[in-house]
Each structure stands twice: as C-alpha cells, then as structure tokens.
Amino acid sequence: MNQNKIIIPLPLPTLNEYTNSNRTHYHQGAKIKKQATRICKAHISKAIEEGFQLTNLPVQMKCTWYVKDKRKDPDNIAFGIKFILDGATAAKLIPNDGWNEIKSITHIFEIDKSFQRVEIEEVNV
C-alpha cells in the first residue's frame, strides 16, 4: 500500500442499498452500517500501520472512486464517504468527523473493471 493513500476495496453500500435496507427493517440498516464501517476501519488501520498520517486538520480529502461500470450514479457511490469517515474516526486517524476535522472532500469517479476501490488522499493546498 502507498503511504500517501488509503485504499479501500469496493463495493461499499450505496445510498440506495442503505436506504432500502432501512426500509426493510431498521436493524438491517444498522447491520450494514456497522459492517461497512468495520471494513473501512480495518483498511485505514492497516494504512496507519504502514505509515499513513495526516499533516493538517481540518483535512482536505480527495476520494477517487474506481468502479466497474457507469451503472450507478456518482452521488450514490460517494455515499460510502459516511462509512469511510466513521472508520477513520474508529481507527483514530481523526478525532471526529465534524467541521473541525474535515475542511473539504473532493470526489473523482473512474472506471476500473478489474479492481474496484476508493483511494483516499490528503490534499495539501
């Protein structure tokens, strides 16, 4: 793994999947959120162990989402940032995911049929 980025394999739940699970039963939505947050925390913790660290708070983040095709809308895919930020908080990369810790989040969407993932980088402006 690159020390300058965090790589989390996709797919994470989309907004539509999460919404539909909550409509099915509220415990189902909570289960999906817990699982996705746990996955993100594990990958973020691994990146921290390998040397990833933030240089500034509040952080300016760039998330590059690599998906297999264009079937899902970008806003639906980017909903995964919820689980990423919750995982970053659980991994103690950031103390919280509020205004004092997050300045901006830029989302970029790309196609990679062989390896779906999101790459998270700190942007130094």
Image (tube, helix red, strand yellow):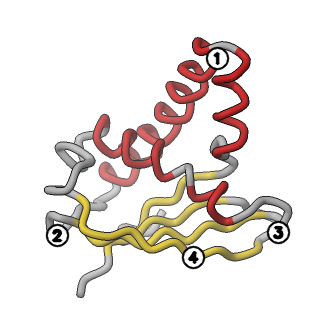
- Assign a secondary structure to mark 3: loop
Q: Which residue is mark 1?
A: 28
What amino acid is found at the position of numbered circle 3 in the picture?
Lys
Q: Is residue 29 above or below residue 64?
A: above
Residue at x 47% of width, y 35% of height: 37
Whether pointer 4 and pointer 2 mark residues with C-beta atoms closer than 8 Å, the reply is no
How far apart are labels 4 and 1 at the CA level? 29 Å
Q: Amino acid at mark 2?
A: Thr
Q: CA distance from mark 1 to mark 3?
A: 27 Å
Q: Secondary structure at mark 4?
A: strand
Q: Which residue is mark 2?
A: 55
Q: Nearer the viewer, mark 2 or mark 1?
A: 1
Vertical arrangement, residue 78 with respect to residue 110, above or below: above
- Amino acid type for the residue under numbered disc 1: Gln
Q: Position of residue 35 (x, y in %)?
A: 56, 27
Which residue is pictured at 64% across the width and 34% down the height? 18
- Is label 4 in contact with label 3 (beta carbons under 8 Å)? no
Foreground mark, 4 or 2, reads 4
| Residue at image point 48% right, 31% down | 38
| Residue 105 coordinates in the image, percent (x, y) | 39, 68
In the image, residue 45 lies at what x, y percent? 36, 43
Which residue is identified by label 3?
Answer: 70
Q: Secondary structure at mark 1?
A: helix
Q: Nearer the viewer, residue 81 or 49?
A: 81
Give the camera-side residue of 104 and 34. 104
Precedes in sequence: disc 4 or disc 2: 2
* Identity of the residue drawn at 46% across and 46% down: 82
* Discs 3, 2 touching: Cβ within 8 Å: no
Q: Residue 108 — which label?
A: 4
